[in-house]
Image (spheres, helix red, strand yellow):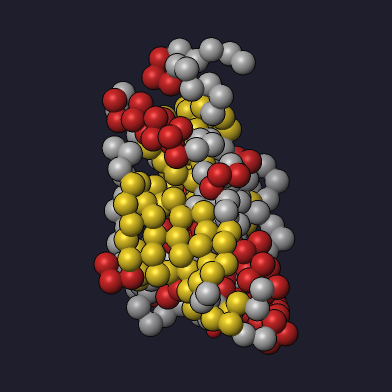
Amino acid sequence: MMRLLGPFSGLEEYVTENVPLARYTWIKLGGPARWFVRPRTLEELQEAARRCVENQIPIYVIGLGANLIVSDEGVNGAVFRLSEEYWRSVEFNEGAVKVGAGVDMQKLLLKAVRAGRAGLECLAGIPATVAGGIRMNAGGKYGSIGTLVSRVTVMDTEGTVFEQTKDDLVFDYRTCNIVAKFILGATLELEEDDPHRIVERTKEIWMFKRNSQPLNTPNAGCVFKNPGGGSAGQLIDQAGLKGMQIGGAAVSTKHANFIVALQGCKAEHVMQLMKMVRETVYYRLGVLLEPEVLIWP
Ligand code: EPU
């Protein structure tokens, strides 16, 4: 193992340098992270965060990178990923499940179905980790994760861990009021139900997604937020932009609010296409769309 010099010296077992982020984003694009941090315990997370603060290194946190565009230049900071076993615990209790930040929502949904616990079906087909899903209040027309969250454990950049409960959590459309940098875990309320009924509901929601969204081509989820009362996808479609292409980035012909990455696609192409879509929809229909995807840096 190469010894790291500088801000993370001594932490080389879980901090690496210049790690391409393309493989960590759902759309498979993006340049390197100057530092990539995969802590295996809370203490390691605290230590790495401390080094960042001490050396004024910007902190980024990545989940499944499913609603994220990383620029081709990458990010000059430390990207944290809570994917080690320590962050993936799942514990069913009466009426709830206690989960770690790095748990994959789709795997959790499967476990919940087997355990006869209902509530997560609304997230069928939405790629996310527990922490990423909570941060962005992942969901769709069938519901979003926020309504299930009764408690979160978070950590600020100083390494202080604390809890937030339902009464001080506010979930809104693709956002929440958690300000701490790191979400470490959560308790989700799940009701008991007949596994067959849960499976049927999950299937139905998943089928809807499969039929209306380009799940098989790399993408970053819905690109723009639905404007009050309207549908971004419908507007982009109406503006005649389905199939529009810049470089390797194309507006999906299946659902116009998705941009798919074809061969040779660069993050730059996606961003140019987003700009073009935004301007065209504004020009033709008078609606200014706001991005839903996060763009790094
Ligand atoms: N529509 C079109 N053309 C298109 C796409 C959609 O005319 O190209 C029409 C549909 O026919 C429908 C309306 O627009 O009448 C709404 O479309 P859809 O039912 O597909 O839902 P959406 O509002 O576009 C939302 C979320 C999705 C979520 C789905 C399903 C947003 C921006 N989008 O899409 O979330 O998967 O509901 O629950 O909130 C995401 O957040 O990343 C995301 C994909």
The residue shown at (37%, 51%) is: 154
Residue 34 image point, x, y percent: 47, 27
Residue 72 versus residue 176 in the image, above or below: above
Residue that sits furthest to the front in the current view: 94
Residue 235 image point, x, y percent: 47, 75
Can you say which quadrant of the picture contains the N terminus?
Answer: top right
The residue shown at (39%, 47%) is: 182
User: In terms of image quadrants, where is residue 22?
Assistant: top right
Question: Seen in the image, is 218 located left or right of residue 94?
Answer: right
How many marks are shown on the rendered structure?
0
Question: Seen in the image, is 188 located left or right of residue 165?
Answer: right
Residue 16 versus residue 38 in the image, above or below: above
The residue lying toward the viewer, choosing from 290 and 169, is 169
Residue 142 versus residue 23 in the image, above or below: below
The residue lying toward the viewer, choosing from 192 and 36, is 192
The residue shown at (69%, 57%) is: 217
User: In terms of image quadrants, where is residue 92?
Assistant: bottom right
The residue lying toward the viewer, choosing from 35 and 271, is 35
The residue lying toward the viewer, choosing from 75 and 89, is 89
Question: Seen in the image, is 161 located left or right of residue 38?
Answer: left
Residue 96 showing in the rendered view: yes
Residue 282 showing in the rendered view: no
Residue 2 image point, x, y percent: 58, 13
Can you say which quadrant of the picture contains the C terminus?
Answer: top left
The residue shown at (44%, 50%) is: 184
Residue 243 image point, x, y percent: 63, 63
